[in-house]
Image (cartoon, rainbow, N blue to C red):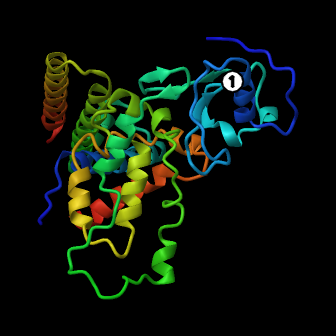
Amino acid sequence: MQEYDLADVNDEMMLLDALTLIKAKDETLSFRRSCGEGVCGSDALNINGRNGLACITPLTSLKQPVEVRPLPGLPVIRDLIVDMTQFFHQYRSIKPYLIVHEPATEVERKQSPEDRDKLDGYYECILCGACSTACPSFWWNPDKFRGPAALLQAWRFLADSRDQATLERLADLDGPYRLFRCHTIMNCVDVCPKGLNPTKAIHNIKQLMLKHLI
Amino acid sequence: MSWHPANGLRSWLIQRLSAVYMAIFMVAVIIAVSICFPSSYNQWHGWIAHPIVNVATAAFFIALMFHTWVGMRDVIIDYVHPLALRLLLLVLLGSSLLLMGIWGIRILFSVMP
């Protein structure tokens, strides 16, 4: 743990601004950042013990001294940069794209506004990794459990009226690990910087499985 | 493609259904006992020997064993990763639950008239 004292901070600064100031003093400090406004999901960090995005966390909201750590549960590459390979492997494994068995249509596939509404609260994920790395089930079984972020995406495609791979997706998620390691701890809901609810998505998947069973 | 629900959904469902049954059973027992509290051994004996109470209690123990199996198995899967140790713990858990279940049902069966 390295300590820095910053004098030139003001009340309008986000944590990312403070990190940038530190980097101006000590250029060896490494962290990821891109858009700086909570859209790209690059700068998810563990801030005072809680995962969040540095760029949308006001310094005034944080207890001093601010303790910033890399996201928990992932291998650290350097300073605040973690290796997200595992996280993106989980994301890829749920096939995050529409699967259609029918032949391609001449025109675009249409979706009613009502069906489109079903994706609200699920498509907004920016894949920052705050939720999955806050999840104890992810910490214990990162290689087998898919984690809240990937499962939220899994539901986003199951809920899509244009997707035709419902059964394949459900079959892939069954078994004791991939979906069912979730014990409704809800750390994911607590930390999501976009206010999304992966636990609800996981619940929806279980309900859909149940519907197909009976 | 046909889809056969394997272990994940089945265990989850067993856990939920057994929990619902146990909750209903416990509320029913509390109500039944508070309405007429059996004040002597013979009354207790007669109460538990009633076929409905007897079978419902046996079902409660079976539900409890299944519920415990799924819950403890979850804990073991989460925290115990070495395969041999996990297998040992699962066997110990399963056999002790099975023994307790059989024991409980034998006792219940023995008080049946």
Element type at mark 1: helix
Quarter of the rendering occupied by the C terminus of chain B = top left
A134 or A68: nearer the viewer? A68
Give the residue at x 40% y 84%: A110
Tell me if residue A199 comes above or below residue A25 in the rendering.
below
B107 or A40: nearer the viewer? A40
Identified by mark 1, the residue type is Lys
Q: Is residue B50 visible?
A: no
A131 or A92: nearer the viewer? A92
Question: Is A74 left, or right, of B63 in this rendering?
Answer: right
Give the residue at x 41% y 55%: A153
Give the residue at x 49% y 40%: A129
Expressed as whole percent of the image width and height from the top left, the position of residue A42 reads 55, 41
Q: Residues within 10 Å of mark 1 (few under 14, many from 20)?
A: some
Question: Is A49 left, or right, of A179 in this rendering?
Answer: right
State the image quarter where residue B46 is shown: top left
Quarter of the rendering occupied by the N terminus of chain B = bottom left
Give the residue at x 32% y 39%: A145
State the image quarter where residue A140 is shown: top left
Question: Is B91 left, or right, of A6 in this rendering?
Answer: left
Expressed as whole percent of the image width and height from the top left, the position of residue B72 reads 29, 29
Which residue does the numbered mark 1 point to in the structure image?
A23
Tell me if residue A107 comes above or below residue B75 in the rendering.
below
Question: Is A106 left, or right, of A70 in this rendering?
Answer: left
Q: Is residue B86 visible?
A: yes
A165 or A175: nearer the viewer? A165
Expressed as whole percent of the image width and height from the top left, the position of residue A14 reads 75, 37
